[in-house]
Image (spheres, grey):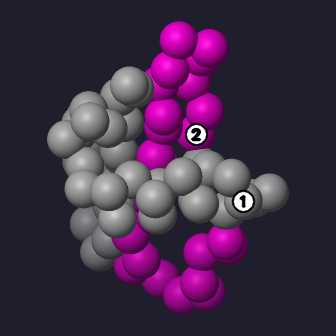
Amino acid sequence: MSELRIVRRGGFAGLKAEGRIEEASLSEADLAALDRLFAAPSPPPPPPGADWFVYDVTRETASGPRTL
């Protein structure tokens, strides 16, 4: 299995938070949703507006990292 790195940026104060989790600890439904995200040709664009949170999800595997 692989590890996920999630970084949240933005919001009113523009603060950054990050964490890591092993994919093996996810439920089957969450893992399926994650697989669909990484299988998509490109992530959806962020909505217009200010003070939104933006998330970067990096899947780290033996073949290298991929970030959405």
Residue at image x 59%, y 16%?
A: 64
Residue at image x 46%, y 46%?
A: 57
> Is residue 10 visible to us here?
no
Quarter placement of the N terminus? top left
Residue type, mark 1 in image: Ala
Q: Quadrant of residue 6?
A: top left
Residue located beneath label 2 in the image: 67
> Is residue 2 visible to us here?
yes
Residue type, mark 2 in image: Thr
- Residue 57 higher or lower than 33, as above or below: above
Q: Is residue 56 magenta?
A: yes
Secondary structure beneath disc 1?
loop
- Residue 15 higher or lower than 23, as above or below: below
Residue located beneath label 1 in the image: 40
From the top left corner, tell me how far across and down residue 65 is, in percent. 56, 24
From the top left corner, tell me how far across and down residue 34 is, in percent. 47, 55
Secondary structure beneath disc 2?
strand
Residue at image x 24%, y 56%?
A: 27
Q: Is residue 47 magenta?
A: yes
Magenta stretch bounds: 44-67
Q: Neighbour class for label 2 at 10 Å: few (<14), some, many (≥20)?
A: few
Dots 2, 1 in contact, CB < 8 A: no
Q: Is residue 33 left or right of residue 1?
A: right
From the top left corner, tell me how far across and down residue 31 is, in percent. 39, 53
Residue at image x 42%, y 77%?
A: 52
- Between discs 2 and 1, the one toward the N terminus: 1
Eye-nearest disc, 2 or 1: 1
Rendered image: mark on residue 1: none
Nearer-the-camera pick, 32 or 68? 32
Q: Quadrant of residue 36?
A: bottom right
